[in-house]
Amino acid sequence: MAHDGSVHRAAHRLTAVTDEALDEIVAEEMAVALVYNGISHAVMMATPCDLEDLGRGFSLTEGIVEKPSEIYDVEVEPVALGIEVRMHIAAQRMARLQERRRSLAGRTGCGLCGLDSIDAAMRPVKPSTSDVKLTRPAIERAMAALPGQQPINRINGATHAAGWATLDGTLLAVREDIGRHNALDKLGGAASRFGLPADQAGFVVVTSRCSYEMVHKAAALGAVAIAAVSAPTSLAIETAERARVALAAFVRDGRLTVYANAQRIVP
């Protein structure tokens, strides 16, 4: 039986001489609406598991709420064409949200779809107030442990993952999704429920490239660093510098490249 987040689909493997019927396991993708105090705010395509974490994490990384306690209740409800994540948030946060209302038509590869102005997209980044450092072996340890905590990807081979690691490289939480931004938001929601990072400094590891939005979300969660298996973008590097967050990329094969705040990573 497929793990949550995967579904069976019939397929055919065609070669020059054969037509083989297959029962394939593929990543499940559904429309997920985030609804605040009865008003739909964002719709994205996502893997339909850990959706409470998605709602909580999105609320935090997008600045809709400033702390987890401002989310009073979360309900995940199936609807005709997808799923609604219905959240009840503090009245003052809802009032602010309505002032900067935007309509997101989320896609699996884009975290900024639907923003109606450059100013809205390039919102201020939260700078880290921590001076802690971490080691290259700790980053490599966390990245090496990440595949072992990706049960959905092991089945369908189509999901990204984001993990929260302590300064020694121990993974405390991992979340998966077809969208890399969604995976990081789910991680943020999980971390907030576990009392992180307030209780323990840590960093984020991701199985994707590192874009502006990924750095911005990691900084919003209080991470001291973000480490990616693939490449960074120029704006991701600039954002990491402003946020005082270390950015390491190409973390694989016993090496990594540090693009921002290298002083925070020691041998």
Image (cartoon, helix red, strand yellow):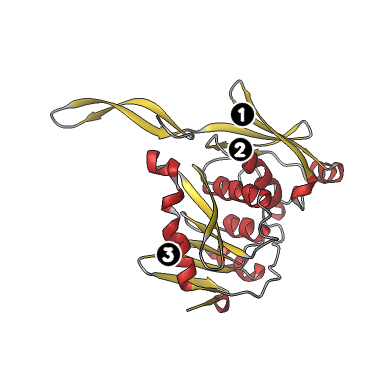
Q: Image point 64% across, 71% down: which residue?
A: 244
Q: Which residue is mark 1?
A: 83
Mark toward the start of the polypeptide (3 vs 1): 1
CB atoms of marks 2 and 3 within 8 Å: no
Q: Which residue is mark 2?
A: 51
Tag 3, which secondary structure? Answer: strand
Q: Which of the 4 image quadrants contains residue 6?
A: top left
Percent position of residue 48, x then y: 55, 34
Q: Residue furthest top?
A: 80
Percent position of residue 67, x then y: 76, 52
| Amino acid type, residue under disc 2 in the picture | Leu
CB atoms of marks 1 and 2 within 8 Å: yes
Q: Is residue 11 above or below residue 190?
A: above
Q: Image point 55% across, 36% down: which residue?
A: 49
Disc 1 versus disc 2: distance between alpha carbons? 9 Å
| Amino acid type, residue under disc 1 in the picture | Ile
